Amino acid sequence: MTEIVGVGFMKTCKVYYFDPEGEKYSLGENVIVETSRGMEMGHIQIANRLVEDDDIVAPLKPIKRRACEEDLEKYRENLERRDHALEICKEKIQKHELEMKLIDAEFMIDGSKLVFYFSADGRVDFRNLAKDLASYFKIRIELRQIGVRDEAKMLGGIGICGRPLCCNKWLHDFQPVSIKMAKQQNLSLNPSKISGSCGRLMCCLNYENSTYKELRKGMPNDNERIETPDGLAKVVNVDYFKGVIQTRAIERDKETGEEVFSPEIKIYTKDEIKRHFNSKTIEEPEVLDEETAREIEELTRD
């Protein structure tokens, strides 16, 4: 077991473990720590606690010190300088004619570095831009390219559900999301209904996917031909939560001998269908027009 404290930062909702080195910290206390980006000010989100060694990515970095009034004043100054830094950077980007979208800027608490975050469709040669910015601000400049999901996480916004974006409020890490999850949940493949503010598949498709995966076991799909206690039938609708299947019986036209569907809807339970399920049935494939297919492909692009 190892003693840790959890520290959070303004730019992320993820909590990182640090070594308290015997000091006792309270929730909400501001502290100065060293991260991969440099010296930053964070706040205690998890007070001193013992955790399993397997839960720790070694080695743990120590907390440098508690934030003093001077650190807080410096932090407020950096926030005020941020808007000016963004304006200057936008001017320099236009000057160098670079295809990049500036997202945010952040001064390190000790004033040793200024980080600019941007997004772009491909790789950007920003070496001359970095030199120009370093010459203007007289400090070390770092330009960090982020993806569209990280951009939405950083900027925030309101999702189609009417609530703040999960990635901005509480989602720690992005999990893989696939179009198969939308199909498994019987959602429309209309890109406008399954894509988030970032233009990629919504992260929430992953939340209930395991539940749907379990409920679908032994259940047929829409339009499948299945064997029921009353004979061959076509699946009209499946209610995974109730475990029932709505079907229309497949009959033969007396005159032509062709297959016709009975107008009567019959309902069977999951257990009944499971006992009579025909493994040779064929699911009718969903046909997408070319434009929708291209949009779907764009949603799944990294």
Image (cartoon, grey):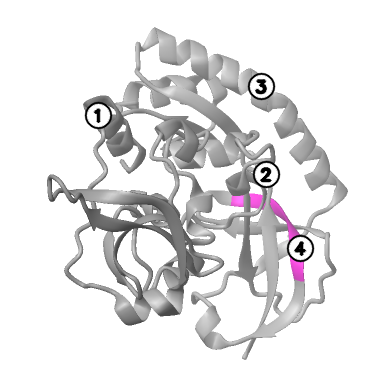
Q: In the rendered image, which residue does mark 4 sit on?
A: 44
Estimate the x, y position of residue 158 in percent, counting from the top left.
65, 34
Q: In the rendered image, which residue does mark 2 sit on?
A: 109
Mark 3: few/some/many CA within 10 Å (<14, 14-19, 20+) = some
Task: Looking at this view, name the residue that lies furthest to the top.
Answer: 95
**Segment colored magenta:** 39-46
> Residue 72 colored magenta?
no
| Residue positioned 60% across, 58% down in the render | 34
| Residue positioned 50% across, 37% down in the render | 196
Q: In which quarter of the image is the C terminus?
A: top left
User: How many angstroms separate mark 1 from mark 4 (CA)?
Assistant: 52 Å
Of residues 169 and 208, the one drawn nearer to the viewer in this rendering: 208
| Residue positioned 75% across, 81% down in the render | 22
Which comes before the other along the chain, label 3 or label 2?
Answer: 3
Of residues 104 and 258, the one drawn nearer to the viewer in this rendering: 258
Q: Nearer the viewer, mark 3 or mark 2?
A: 3
Q: In the rendered image, which residue does mark 3 sit on?
A: 83
- 33 relative to 260, above or below: below
Q: What residue type is labelled 4?
A: Ile
User: How many angstroms separate mark 3 from mark 1 (CA)?
Assistant: 45 Å
Q: Which amino acid does label 2 sit on?
A: Ile
